[in-house]
Image (spheres, rainbow, N blue to C red):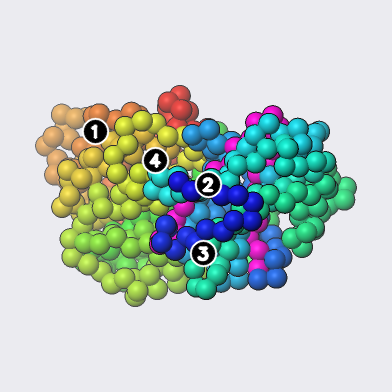
């Protein structure tokens, strides 16, 4: 680990060549609000969606995500620098006082960089470094000579968060308190309203789907629930007809609509798997009309089917500290992950899949498996034993032993469009609400 002093710079190319790292912030003596600003080459916040904080926890590209702190940190950001658009030239991590006080009252604090579970560098600060400031720029991640570098900053602002926002070219509501929104609730409500307008404008075919998803969520008490949504699609050769006839495209739109109820960024993450695993750009309101067809053009159908490899890639994406490997202790996050996992056949890596599901039970991630084919429909185990099924392994996974919590559900359909929208969304919420209760009880959700 390298100890940084104010103004010191650290090249990141060799330390984190994949650009995946975490920034943790800790402070003693004061309650601080932490934010990350994505700035252009002029040092301005040209897109307010690139201010990441408690009310807006993720950038549209997924390159910056606010997370609950761990290991002594009060807050953290997960960075995937390769996902940031070229217009974002630098990221600035800031802290501002929540309530009264000034930075000189701070006992001690630090900002640190981590990658792969290893601490790379730390910049320590204390109240003696400041006077009457109410906000401070802590660290900066910036582009230089085709790579990324980190600099310890430690520059204070007397005006607090308002001064920071103005410094970066953002607008501050003069009628509101120092925080960017009057309250978390009002900010979330406004984000929902804005998203509804975007759906009407950019993807009108989703309007009725979003409303129907909302009805199903209301039935199970999840109207205001927030979660990340991931769609994992089988691209083995046997799926060819379903892609050709547009059935997968229409199903993906239904999952995107669910994502629009669970989150306010208007997009869902997508993974494709056959022999290999692919992670294309998210499916969003702006590209949803032709998303699946274009994804299959870039990643043609493959031989083999490997659930476990896909699950490992998904886990590594959302929880990079273990890179999809073994996890034996619970890890908490502010938002759960809902994975819609679609396949039309068995897997060639059953042992790996079982391990992945057991390890993932220690993470706030729920797996909803859907098999397209013939499954056992009878609820009677005696009668089901006499029925044929294309998915005996998925049925086994649904009752897999050795998990911290039951983190998966399975159902089968003869076709992706077998159920009406109302029936599908009800089906997708069969076990998820119960898992949320278990996950909170085990400390998986902060």
Q: Which mark is residue 148?
A: 3
Q: Residue furthest right?
A: 175
Q: Is residue 300 left or right of residue 172?
A: left
Q: Secondary structure at mark 3?
A: strand
Find out whether residue 392 is within the magenta segment: no
First of labels 1, 3 by sequence position: 3
| Residue carrying label 1 | 400
| Residue carrying label 4 | 366
Q: Alpha carbon of mark 4 to alpha carbon of mark 1: how far?
A: 14 Å
Q: Alpha carbon of mark 3 to alpha carbon of mark 4: how far?
A: 34 Å
Q: Alpha carbon of mark 2 to alpha carbon of mark 3: how far?
A: 18 Å
Q: Residues within 10 Å of mark 2 (few under 14, many from 20)?
A: few
Q: Is residue 274 left or right of residue 11?
A: left
First of labels 3, 4 by sequence position: 3
Quarter of the rendering containing residue 359 = top left
Query: As displayed, is residue 73 above or below residue 198?
Result: above
Q: Alpha carbon of mark 1 to alpha carbon of mark 2: how far?
A: 46 Å
Q: Alpha carbon of mark 1 to alpha carbon of mark 3: how far?
A: 43 Å
On the image, the x and y values in percent for residue 100 come to 81, 33
- Magenta stretch, residue numbers: 17-40
| Contact flag, marks 3 and 4 (Cβ < 8 Å) | no
Query: As displayed, is residue 254 above or below residue 441?
Result: below
Q: Is residue 110 left or right of residue 258?
A: right
| Residue carrying label 2 | 3
Q: Secondary structure at mark 2?
A: strand
Find out whether residue 23 is within the magenta segment: yes
Residue at left offset 49%, top offset 68%: 147
């Amino acid at each position: 680990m390298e100890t940084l002093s104010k103004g010191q710079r650290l090249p990141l190319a060799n330390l984190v060549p994949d650009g995946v790292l975490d920034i943790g912030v800790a402070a003693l003596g004061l309650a601080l609000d932490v934010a990350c600003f994505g700035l252009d080459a002029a040092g301005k916040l040209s897109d307010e969606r690139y201010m990441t904080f408690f009310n807006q926890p993720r950038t549209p590209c997924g390159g910056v995500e606010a997370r609950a702190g761990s290991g002594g940190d009060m807050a953290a950001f997960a960075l995937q620098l390769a996902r940031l658009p070229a217009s974002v030239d630098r990221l600035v991590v800031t802290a501002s006082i929540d309530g009264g006080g000034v930075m000189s009252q701070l006992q001690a604090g630090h900002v640190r960089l981590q990658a792969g579970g290893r601490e790379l560098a730390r910049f320590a600060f204390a109240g003696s470094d400041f006077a009457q400031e109410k906000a401070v720029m802590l660290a900066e991640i910036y582009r230089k000579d085709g790579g990324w570098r980190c600099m310890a900053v430690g520059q204070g602002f007397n005006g607090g968060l308002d001064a920071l926002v103005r410094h970066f070219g953002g607008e501050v509501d003069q009628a509101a308190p120092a925080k960017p929104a009057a309250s978390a609730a009002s900010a979330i409500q406004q984000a929902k309203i804005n998203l509804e307008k975007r759906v009407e404008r950019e993807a009108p075919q989703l309007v009725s789907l979003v409303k129907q998803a909302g009805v199903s969520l209301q039935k199970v008490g999840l109207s205001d629930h927030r979660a990340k949504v991931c769609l994992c699609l089988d691209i083995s050769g046997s799926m060819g007809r379903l892609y050709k006839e547009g059935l997968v495209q229409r199903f993906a739109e239904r999952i995107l609509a669910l994502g629009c109820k669970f989150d306010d960024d208007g997009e869902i993450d997508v993974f494709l798997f056959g022999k290999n695993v692919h992670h294309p750009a998210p499916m969003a309101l702006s590209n949803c009309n032709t998303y699946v067809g274009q994804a299959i053009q870039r990643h043609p159908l493959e031989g083999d089917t490997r659930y476990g490899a896909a699950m490992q890639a998904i886990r590594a994406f959302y929880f990079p500290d273990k890179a999809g490997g073994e996890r034996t202790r619970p890890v908490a996050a502010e938002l759960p992950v809902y994975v819609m996992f679609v396949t039309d056949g068995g897997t060639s890596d059953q042992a790996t899949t079982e391990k992945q599901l057991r390890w993932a039970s220690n993470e706030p991630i729920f797996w909803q498996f859907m098999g397209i084919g013939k499954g056992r429909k009878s609820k009677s185990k005696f009668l089901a034993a006499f029925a044929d099924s294309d998915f005996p392994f998925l049925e086994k996974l649904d009752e897999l032993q050795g998990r911290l919590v039951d983190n998966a559900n399975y159902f089968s359909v003869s076709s992706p469009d077998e159920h009406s929208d109302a029936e599908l969304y009800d089906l997708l919420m069969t076990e998820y609400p119960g898992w949320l209760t278990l996950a909170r009880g085990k400390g998986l959700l902060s």
